[in-house]
Amino acid sequence: MPEEAKLALEDGTIYKGEGFGFKTIKPGEVVFATGMTGYVESLTDPSYKGQILMSTYPLQGNYGISREWFQSEGIKAEGFIVREHNTHPSHGKSEESLTEFLKEFKIPGISGIDTRSLTLKIRKHGTMKGVLATEEIEDQELITMVKEQPEIGEVDLVDQVCVKEPKVYGEEYKHRAAILDCGIKNNSIKALLKREVGVVVLPYKTDVKDILDYSPEALLVSSGPGDPTRVKKAAENVRGLAEKMPIFGICLGQQIIGLAFEASIYKMKFGHRGINQPVKDLTTEKVCITSQNHGFTVDPQSLEDTPLKMNQVNLNDGTPEGLEHEELPISSVQYHPEAGPGPHDTDYYFDNFVESLKNY
């Protein structure tokens, strides 16, 4: 018989459902993501570190788990909230069930939750601190744990997911890009290797001199979790390399590029998470559907006195989805052109990055 699980929120609400996965208690910022598929990629995305992920699509786990879909070496989200989870997946590549997957990485899950109600609450009040318990605990103790939890902007999440030592891939290729790692996804590395560009993945705190020792022809500033103002060294590195090579930023990387040129950042009410965000290119007027996962963004008004201009916009709320330097080969996107999960409408941005690398 399924055991009771509880999700407590900072406003004092406690949702009760059925526990699955690992028996434990985990705190985190409760966020929702839209999309019918992609739970493996989302759970293993380093950008979800520090967060308890809820899927708005009611059924999860129906096609199982394959390591081929991992975006890092394991689950990075702190917990998983679903309306219903499937215990008998059906897919040719499936290696295990969602329950087994969560158990393997010691992550709790809760099902039987009214995810529509919880989504509406977050949309109305914003993301909330929460604690997910799949083992026995008194309600009041759970609420106390929530209230004592730090805000997500007070935690150095990037340090928990970035590489500690340099990693080199594709040494056989003629061209090489450096990746400033704040929580890189596997798909981003694969996108460059697919285009026969080798990569060196470096901790974001790596000094400019040491980055240059690897002789990269361009720099990719990666996606990652949390507040970009906590990774000041990454912005310093962008400034130090700005006139030395092309630079491209993805998601958190866009925010870091913004900070490098003195734009400001703010925390969004409930962020963009999912695989169906519409983005308009202000130059071509082309609209693409994009994969996104962020809770912070560049303040567009703060760009006025910088050399950066907004060249893409989110059609839902008008937030910046792309930046471009007026003089230097520096650009960024707030969404994920590498997908994983989601549409591949904007995969061509890696072609643009490689072209700038080769022609600089």
Image: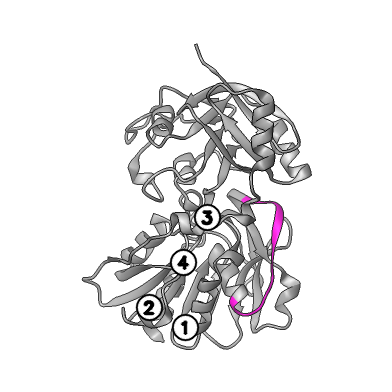
> Mark 1: few, some, or many residues within 10 Å (few <14, many ≥20)?
some
Question: What span is in magenta?
Answer: 260-272
Looking at numbered disc 4 in the image, what kind of residue is underneath it? Tyr
Q: Answer yes or no: do the residues labelled 1 and 2 have beta carbons within 8 Å?
A: yes
* Front-lying residue, 160 or 352: 160
Q: Nearer the viewer, mark 1 or mark 3?
A: 3
* Residue that badge 3 annotates: 157
* Residue that badge 2 annotates: 211
- Identity of the residue drawn at 40% across and 26% down: 89
> Mark 2: few, some, or many residues within 10 Å (few <14, many ≥20)?
many
* Residue that badge 4 annotates: 348
Of pointers 4 and 1, the one earlier in the residue sequence: 1
Marks 4 and 3 sit apart, C-alpha to C-alpha, by 30 Å
Q: Answer yes or no: do the residues labelled 4 and 3 have beta carbons within 8 Å?
A: no
Q: Secondary structure at mark 3?
A: loop
Q: Secondary structure at mark 2?
A: helix
Rendered view: 56 above or below 358:
above
Of pointers 4 and 3, the one earlier in the residue sequence: 3
Where residue 198 appears, x then y in whole percent?
Answer: 30, 70
Looking at numbered disc 3 in the image, what kind of residue is underneath it? Leu
Looking at numbered disc 1 in the image, what kind of residue is underneath it? Leu
Of pointers 1 and 2, the one earlier in the residue sequence: 2
Marks 3 and 2 sit apart, C-alpha to C-alpha, by 22 Å
Marks 4 and 2 sit apart, C-alpha to C-alpha, by 26 Å
Looking at numbered disc 2 in the image, what kind of residue is underneath it? Ile
Where residue 291 appears, x then y in whole percent?
Answer: 55, 53
Q: Answer yes or no: do the residues labelled 1 and 3 have beta carbons within 8 Å?
A: no
Indicate which disc residue 241 carries. Answer: 1
